[in-house]
Amino acid sequence: MEDVADVNDADVRGMDALFHKAADHVQAQVSVRNPAFNGKDLQLSIYALYKQALVGPCNVKKPGFLDPAGRAKWDAWNKLGTLSSMEVGRD
């Protein structure tokens, strides 16, 4: 595996474009209810990895008790801790 210092701007742009293409594909599959993407646990894991890759470690307050969907997303994202964007790309 390449050292992070060896990655140039063209590599980053290419990885960024590929990441967004993959994210769009996953979103489309969830939208059409592809059975391979139906599990809530899988969807939460994908959401958490997406947020970790774009934002980094969870940096928002945990949603309130009356927002169970928001709490589930927050829990999944927060569970990743300080996993770096580069590590997310390998998962």
Image (cartoon, rainbow, N blue to C red):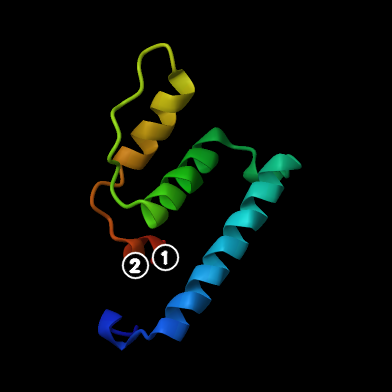
Cα distance, mark 1 to mark 2? 5 Å
Residue 40, relative to residue 37: is it above or below?
above
User: Which residue corresponds to the image point at 43% horizontal and 33% vertical from the top-left?
Assistant: 73
Residue type beneath disc 1? Gly
Which residue is at 25% across, 46% downward?
81
Q: How many labels sit on residues?
A: 2
- Relative height, residue 4 to residue 87 (above, below): below
The residue under the point 64% across, 44% down is 37
User: Residue 35: horizontal and vertical position, in percent?
Assistant: 71, 42
Quarter of the rendering containing residue 6: bottom left
Q: In the image, what residue type sits under mark 2?
A: Met
Q: Position of residue 38 (x, y in %)?
A: 64, 38
Residue 74: image quadrant is: top left
Residue tagged 2: 86
Mark 1 near mark 2, Cβ–Cβ under 8 Å? yes
Q: Residues within 10 Å of mark 1 (few under 14, many from 20)?
A: few
Left or right of 72, for residue 81: left
As drawn, the label of residue 89 is: 1
Q: Is residue 20 above or below residue 40?
A: below
Quadrant (top left, top right, bottom left, bottom right) of the C terminus:
bottom left
